[in-house]
Amino acid sequence: MNEIIEDFLENGFVKIRNTVEPDLCQDLMEQFKKLRPIDEDFFKENVYMKEEEYDPEKTARKTGPSEGNNLVENVNLDFIEKNENVQGAISSILGSNYKIINKKFVMGVPKNFIPKWIIKEIDDMPSANLCQFVKPEYRNMTYFHGIDFHMDIVDHKNRVGDLITLYVYIDGVDKNMSPLFVVPKSHVFGALPFPHDIEILNKNSMTFSNGKGKSKDLNFNMLTGTAGSIWFWSAYTLHGTQPTYETNVPRVSLRYIIEREKSSEELPIDKFLKEIDGDLTLTTTRKYEDNPDETIHVGSKLKTALDHQSNQANYLMISKKNRDLHLRDT
């Protein structure tokens, strides 16, 4: 486990090797398909609201899964959660009495699964969380069509990030299936509100700034892999996904949020936090949060990188009407 600890302390990001059996993930995928058919017509006819039903002023912020309304409650995930390699990797950072505080299915939804009127609503948005367009009875998982680079600490206002995000691919994911992109070492400046100060240098590198005069050139990794591939990263690690354009196959994954054990023992997560050169908490998670009447510009920097448009971001004017569409239940 020393290698895992070293990777986490240096990069804030770890790939767990020799983990779960792909066959067990495929079994889970088949169970998932029975609970939520992966079919274009089913999605368009059943999952989404009709255009005339949608009112962005009435859409609640927390539109994702919750206790009692979570698709993972219908499946057995012991083959992941009780896997010795998975438990050992998590314990090496958070202690053996770590706690899973959130888990859910996440789908990268291909364009052909989305009605045209919704495509127009989300076009070029940095965070195309589709849950606000989904009927309440289907909000028991999270649906994305791309999300720009962000930190998961934005979902934990006023909390120190003594937790990790763990991601499991339950089906094979290639470069065309909305794979995750993660930026190792991007925890260096600590907790920063969304959107982030990023300049794309080329298709896999950026300059990341803290807005206070410090910046760092970083590379980012595209996470492709077979069913059963597992990674985890810190609450301060930048990551995102691209929209799914070139395939008709959704990416279905599991996302966990796992917190440190409640003890006074110093653990690797504590050493990691001490080495961060910046704030560990956020009182404001979005830059527009303190001034709701202000209109700001944000850029889809990940999309820019994937479009090979060096040093340029595609900017979107976010009005008061649509600003709450960003980064809900990421």
Image (cartoon, rainbow, N blue to C red):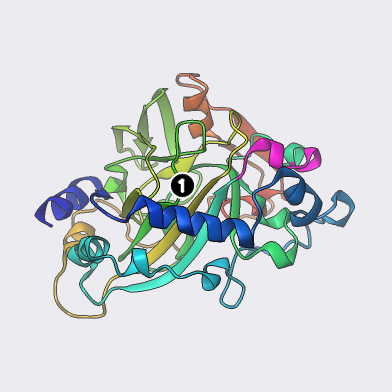
Residue 35 visible to an observer of this rendering? yes
Q: Which residue is mark 1?
A: 171
Q: Residues within 10 Å of mark 1 (few under 14, many from 20)?
A: many
> Is residue 79 left or right of 302 when viewed as pictured?
left
Q: Nearer the viewer, residue 17 or 179?
A: 17
> Is residue 295 left or right of 91 when viewed as pictured?
right
Q: Residue at x 75, y 61 (%)?
A: 135
Q: Amino acid at mark 1?
A: Asp
Q: Nearer the viewer, residue 314 or 228?
A: 228
**Residue 25, position in %: x, y?**
42, 55
Considering the image in quadrants, where does the N terminus appear? bottom left
Per the picture, the main secondary structure of the magenta-coloured stretch is helix
Judged from the image, the secondary structure of the residue bearing numbered disc 1 is loop
**Residue 180, position in %: x, y?**
43, 41
Relative to residue 95, is residue 23 depicted above or below?
above
Q: Residue at x 75, y 51 (%)?
A: 42
> Is residue 65 left or right of 170 when viewed as pictured?
right
**Residue 112, position in %: x, y?**
70, 36
Q: Residue at x 76, y 37 (%)?
A: 120
Direction right: furthest residue:
52
Q: Nearer the viewer, residue 222 or 46?
A: 46
Q: Residue at x 53, y 30 (%)?
A: 303
**Residue 136, position in %: x, y?**
73, 66
Direction bottom: furthest residue:
263
Relative to residue 90, is residue 209 depicted above or below?
above
Residue range (magenta): 109-118
> Is residue 117 left or right of 325 when viewed as pictured?
right
Relative to residue 2, is residue 41 depicted above or below?
above
